[in-house]
Image (cartoon, rainbow, N blue to C red):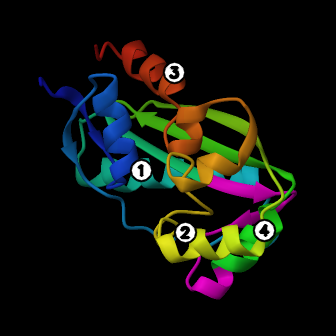
Amino acid sequence: MNAKDFILASGSPQRIALLRQVVFEPKQIKPADICEDCLEHEKPLPYVKRMALEKAKHIAKLYPNENILACDTIVTVGQRILHKANSVDEQRSYMKLLSGRSHRVISSVCLINKKGKVSQRTVTTKITMKMLTDWEIEEYLQSGEWKGVCGYKIEGRLAAYVTKIVGSYSGVVGLPLNETINLLKGEGIK
C-alpha cells in the first residue's frame, strides 16, 4: 500500500484501521502525548475541537513542513464528558448512565498543512442505547473492550445494544472518514 503524504498524530488502532480501510495509509504515525485535561467550565464541543488542534500543533512543531492529521473523539451525556475510565467501577457508572438513553459522540478532525494552515471539521453523532440489564453491563465490563477508549467501542460487543445511530458511524469509531478524506484531498493528498 502506498503511503500518503501526511503524518497521523495518533496511535489509535481504530483510526489507523479506518484510514487503511479507505486506502489512506499515513506515511508516519506519531502519537501526540499531550495533557487532555478539560479547562475549567469547558463545554464538550470547544473541548474536543481544542484537543484535536492541540494534538496537531504538538506534532507539527516536531515535524515542520509536513501535513499533520489529528483527531479527538469524546462521548457526552448532556454537557458531561465521559473520559477514559480508570477503573471497572468508573466504567460501570458510565454504562449505567448510557443505559436506556441517547448520548452524543463528537469527533473533531484537524489538518495542519505544510505551510501551517489549519483546517478542522467536527461531527456530532447521536446514539441511543437500549436499557441494559445488570448482567449485560457486567458481561461488557468483563470483556475489557472499554479499556483505553472513552465510553465504549461501537465496533465491539456493545453494538448489540445500540438501537439507533444518527450521524457518522466512523466518527463514533474514532475518525469521521468523509470529513477526513475531504480535508486530505483538499490539500491535494489523494
SS at mark 2 in the image: loop
Q: Residue at x 82, y 68 (%)?
A: 97
Q: Is the Cβ of the residue at disc 1 closer than 8 Å to that at disc 3? A: no
Q: Residue furthest left?
A: 2
The residue under label 2 is which amino acid type? Answer: Glu
Q: How far apart in space, not on screen, are marks 2 and 1 (Cα)?
A: 14 Å
The tag earlier along the polypeptide, 1 or 3, is 1
**Where does label 4 land, which residue?**
133
Front tag of 4 and 2: 4
Q: Residues within 10 Å of mark 2 (few under 14, many from 20)?
A: some
Q: Quadrant of the C terminus?
A: top left
SS at mark 4 in the image: loop
Q: Is the Cβ of the residue at disc 4 closer than 8 Å to that at disc 2? A: no
State whether residue 39 appears in this view: no
Q: Is the Cβ of the residue at disc 1 closer than 8 Å to that at disc 4? A: no
Q: Residues within 10 Å of mark 1 (few under 14, many from 20)?
A: many
State which region is magenta: 74-90
Q: Is residue 143 above or below residue 129?
A: below
SS at mark 1 in the image: helix
**Where does label 1 land, which residue?**
57
User: x, y percentage for residue 12?
Assistant: 37, 54
Q: How many marks?
A: 4
Q: Residue at x 41, y 47 (%)?
A: 56
Closer to us: 135 or 21: 135
The tag earlier along the polypeptide, 3 or 2, is 2
**Where does label 3 land, which residue?**
178
